[in-house]
Amino acid sequence: MKRLLSTIAAAGLALGVGAQGFDNLPDPIEDVNKVVDNTPDSIAKALMSRPAPGSTRKGEQPVLFLVGNSTMRNGTLGNGNNGQWGWGYYFPKYFNAQKIAVENQALGGMSTRTFYTDLWPAIRQALKPGDWVIVSIGHNDNGEFFDQKRARAVIPGVDPDTCYVGFNQRTQKQDTVYSYGTYLRKYISEIRAKGANPILMSLTPRDAFDDKGKIVRKAQTEWAAYVAAVEAVPFVDLNEISGAKLDTYSRWKQQYHFMGDKIHTSKFGAEMNARSAAEGLWESNNPQLLPLKAMMQGVVGDNYNDRREKGKPVVFFTGDSTVKNADKEEDGMWGWASQAQTVFDESKITLVNAARAGRSTRSFIREGLWEKVYNSLQPGDFVTIQFGHNDICPITDAKARGVIAESKDTLHVYRLDNGTYEVVYSFGWYLKKMIDDCREKGATPILVSLTPRNEWPGGKIERRDDSYGKWYREVVKETGVEFVDLHNISADFLDKKYAKKRLSDDKEKAKAEMAQIKEKAGLYFKKDHTHASKLGAQMNAKSFAKGLKANGSTLAKYLKK
């Protein structure tokens, strides 16, 4: 890292008295687009949190270097502590780490010009034959040519014969500014001179719309595409791939892909852009990319399409262990969707139990379990969404599954116990995300209240209508989603069998009476007060079917007669 800093100093950043260097920039810095590119911390920390160029190389294996700005690597430390993430953080998942290292050398606030003058020399020095470099930069290329704070603007367009000469207040030196296309040509030429492989990508889309209500496509796309064509360099139109996705989303979904402003992305937006970049490489017909594609993995997202039968819709069951458990031993714990075949006619519909024990709305989404369902959805499918038992857990502990306890669209950046950061949303927000995703794909979401627990306060089974029940209903009111109140349907069934109208006035006797009720009701539960026996799972499946019929649900036509 000392070598990196000395290289930067040699490039003109170790300045005289009164000069403006990277280490003492006023924080925060707002650019002409009203965007703050770095968190309130020194840029020196940002530089030192990036890997030294080439330091991730394993033996003689190649390195894929990423050149960009805050949309690729966000914040001073790039760790999400401001709720914003760059797509370069998630890009390595699409490459086999045993074959190639992916090194995110991007830095917030950089333009094609300032990256080239200040950071590129150290990367260029680290390049070896067979390496790859993705250049996707340009969000910060406007503004003043020679201002004190940034001096990062470039001449719009691709003309190689245009330049502007003046005194750079930041470096306190005479400086020459070239066109956007000229800087791209410089990168390409120098990458090739080292025997490495250049790739140009257009920019990530902004949260901005044209007069037709579509996401604006940036002018730099055409310039980069032109340079790539002239220089015979692979080009991926990231701006178009991600922009097309955003255009298909609801306005609500489109907005949560950004965080804090109209350029920087949330984790959702960063993951989408990383996937778009990977898809652009994977689907390219450019033969130059074949060696790189041979080192890629996981571009085609996980799905359940192998379960699909021609001509039959699919109902996906999502949730926690009350929906899917071990589901093996006759006297073990069972999730109710494991018994869905007792109420559904499988000659008409395919049943896919996508639930996972121990999950909350938050962890089900974060771990990619929801994405697998989302990737599988087709028009005419159904999705049941039932969570709650694990959502009340601590927010920052090792399992990281607790949520903000309400239905409103609230969020907060939490520092987890393991030192990482995560934006956590409310219980209602996560439900609304899944509902919205289903509708986007033409599938029908059905919200299902959580299963009742084997607790009998006052001699009647516990009802959680003032917490989860309340939040479920508030989401139903806001979204108009179909709702099956399995919680109360099953609770009504159990109350009818075991509830005591009046407990003894004697506290000890009353306590014994409640324990007796719990023991009798234990036929429907296994090992604890939450998980169902096989009989209990079948009872909950029947409750679900009863709720569908009462709703006049479209899904009800697939029930057994």
Image (spheres, helix red, strand yellow):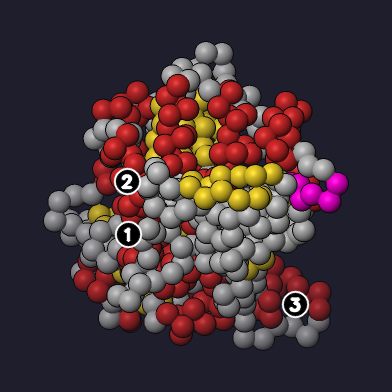
- Is residue 18 rendered magenta in the image? yes
Residue for badge 2? 225
- Is residue 187 rendered magenta in the image? no
In this rendered view, identify the residue nearer to me: 436 or 211.
211
Q: Which amino acid does label 1 sit on?
A: Ala
Q: Tell me which label, 2 or 1, sits earlier in the chain.
A: 2
Q: Is mark 3 on a helix, strand or loop?
A: helix
In the picture, measured across the screen, residue 467 lies left or right of residue 433, that is: right
In the picture, measured across the screen, residue 39 lies left or right of residue 135, that is: right
Circle 3: is it few (<14), some (14-19), or many (20+) Cα within 10 Å?
A: some
Question: Which mark is on residue 510?
Answer: 3
Please determine whether, in this image, residue 100 is positioned above or below residue 81. Answer: above
In the picture, measured across the screen, residue 108 lies left or right of residue 348, that is: right
Task: Tell me the quarter of the picture where residue 495 sits.
Answer: bottom right
Residue for badge 1? 244
Magenta span: chief secondary structure: loop
Which residue is farthest right?
17
The range drawn in magenta is: 17-22
